[in-house]
Image (cartoon, helix red, strand yellow):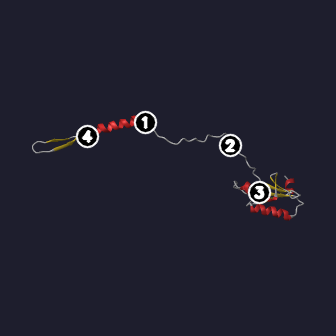
Amino acid sequence: MGIGLIGGKGEMLCEANVVPLIDILLVLLVIFMVIPHRQMGLQANLPQEAGSPVKVVPPETIIVQIASDGSLRINQSVVQREELRERLERIFALRAQRVAFLQGDRSLEFQVVARVLDDMQAARVSPVGLLTSELEKNP
């Protein structure tokens, strides 16, 4: 970079020559454009899209049935008395509506039905509807 002093009759004039600075900047620009930037990263295996997922649609209505011998069923699936609460909690875990129905045999004592109702309430099933055989006969 050069500074030129031009003077006449006691005047001093300073001028900075910026042409060499522009030349250096252009050379640097060309160097950085020509040299490829190598970016190294970790090799990642991305998950691939699986086939269409098989969705199991749970039945809308949950019916707990008590047979005359005291055996329990949830929508025709046999359940032991000790497993009833856990199964109901699993069934209603992903549901917004926690409605279920209880259907008991006519010959059952109320105490058996009350125990099943207690288990349903402990599983936070509410409300619980009662189904009777008279309702099934009348359409």
| Cα separation between marks 3 and 2 | 28 Å
Q: From the top left corner, tell me how far across and down residue 31 is, in percent.
A: 37, 36
Q: Which residue is mark 4?
A: 18
* Towards the viewer: 138 or 82: 82
Q: Does label 1 or label 4 sit earlier along the sequence?
A: 4
The residue at 77%/57% (across/down) is 100
Direction from residue 121 to residue 37 in the image, left or right: left
- The x, y position of residue 7, in whole percent, is 13, 42
- Does the residue at mark 1 contact the one at mark 4 (Cβ under 8 Å)? no
Q: Secondary structure at mark 2?
A: loop
Crowdedness near tag 1: few (<14), some (14–19) or many (≥20) residues, C-alpha within 10 Å: few
Dot 2 corresponds to which residue?
Answer: 53
Badge 3 crowding class, 10 Å Cα cut-off, few under 14, some 14 to 19, many 20 or more, is: many
Secondary structure under the numbered disc 1 in the rendered image: loop
Q: Amino acid at mark 1?
A: Pro
Q: Nearer the viewer, mark 3 or mark 2?
A: 2
Locate the N terminus by quadrant.
top left
* Residue that carries the numbered disc 3 in the rendered image: 100
- First-in-chain label (4 vs 2): 4
State the residue lying farthest toward the left.
9
The tag on residue 36 is 1
Comes first in the chain, label 1 or label 3: 1
Q: Position of residue 119 (x, y in %)?
A: 78, 62
Q: Quadrant of residue 10?
A: top left
Q: Nearer the N terminus, badge 4 or badge 3? A: 4
Give the Cα separation between the discs numbered 1 and 4: 29 Å
Quadrant of residue 85 in the image?
A: bottom right
